[in-house]
Amino acid sequence: MADFLTSVMVSFRLFVAFLCATLAAANSHSKPHAPTKWCTVKHNHDGADDTANILKAFKDCATDSIITFTATNYSAYTPITLAGLDNVIIHLDGNLLLPNNLTKVQHEINITTNQPSTYATPWFYFHGNNVELIGSADFEWGRFYGFGQHWWDLGVQTLRPQLATFNVTNGQIHSAGPSSPWLPLTTSHKVIKPVAWGWNLPGTNTRVENHYVDAKPDNGSRWDSVSFPFNTDGINISGQNITVDGYYGHNGDDCISVINGARNVFATNGFCGFSSHGLSIGSLGKGGSVQTVQGVVFKNWTMDGAVYGARFKSWTGGAGFADNVTWEDITLVNVSTAIFVTQKYSLGPPPNVTSNSSTQISNFKYNNFKGGLNVNWTCITPVCWNFVAGGDATQSIIFDLYPDTALNISVGTMKVHPFEKPANATTVICDPSTLALGEQSILGFNCTRGPYVATPIVG
């Protein structure tokens, strides 16, 4: 326990040092220069490939420039790397289309030199400094079409692309219109039927506003596996100083997934629909790796039909830590589990291992969760893939921990009721033998396998 406390203090000092360095870098960064060049991306008619036109425009206007996609459909039939950008504003007044041909996409992903992200290789890779992507205020434009429906219909899960990586220092993604995070009609860039993972943010000092995701199958539902959109994460974040303000999406995986390397993440004002996996940290520590996340806030979200509201997941045998994470002001509508924490994550049945090594977690705060639960949406296969012994759709909280690996975890206001049952029917799954010494006094609820009972948070 002493070693764990020491590691937490060391990580905190490193966090403070990082903040100081980040602020110093931000203050020393020169303001972008006024654009001196303008490029309009040429468009080929009749659905011909526009990749060469896109590459030429970004080559000609890579510095101190404005690049405009006009209000038309651009076909990007091969993966594209747009690197070396410096002080560039991109107006996406048109739409960008991947091939509507599954085998073509698989072939191109198999041979592309695009830099892979955490989960897959992106079709669009942006890299540079001071890059601003401005989506059309018109809901019919500023779209990225992935044509994922065909993939979901066939259940194909090999050689799938991530839609885009925005690996930028001092980046912005927003709309040309007024800001309104709850209304899709004012979203900036729109992700329509992505094959799988959406946007990846590994950069530094990046702000995303009003992100829209439509990864809901046209012919399926959250309670069956017909055309299910597996792995359709909305946004994966591994960068530093990242803000997402405004999100509206329907998908079949995490709305926001904060993963290894992420620092200082603020995600606010969002709606997650269909069968989302919620607001997630992880997964971390796969294959015994050392992975870390620090300084994350999720605030003011509505989860409608999601599997989870708030989730943490790490693999058995992993190392590293997740520290200083807050979920606050979360509204639940027909959600399977409000708060789910597991250090025994797997892609199948629970791991049958003897190792107690796990990613350490500390300073997790949950506050002001309200709303209702429903059935376990993961039972679309013969065995529910998030199976927890004793789970019966009444649990507002599930803590699946290894002993003495979690420190300073607290749950504040919780007003959650099971489906068609009163609030006093809400239960929790928590093994008190796994809590570190003194943790029960600050936990905020009675750690047990039974009814949810709020307790005072001492200190």
Image (cartoon, helix red, strand yellow):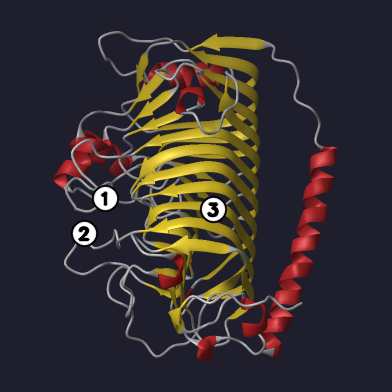
Q: Secondary structure at mark 3?
A: strand
Specify the quadrant that holds the C terminus: bottom right
- The circle drawn on residue 222 is 1
Amino acid at pointer 1 = Arg
Mark 2 surroundings within 10 Å by alpha-carbon count, few (fewer than 14), some (14 through 19), many (20 or more): some
Position of 119 compared to 92: left or right?
left
Position of 110 compared to 169: left or right?
left
Picture quarter containing residue 90? top right
Where is residue 443? Give x, y as percent: 62, 77
Amino acid at pointer 2 = Ile
- The residue that disc 3 covers is 330
- The residue that disc 2 covers is 380
Nearer-the-camera pick, 457 or 98? 457
Q: Residues under labels 2 and 3: Cα distance?
A: 25 Å
Mark 1 surroundings within 10 Å by alpha-carbon count, few (fewer than 14), some (14 through 19), many (20 or more): many
Q: Earlier in the sequence, mark 1 or mark 2?
A: 1
Q: Earlier in the sequence, mark 2 or mark 3?
A: 3
Q: Relative to residue 312, is residue 3 depicted above or below?
A: below
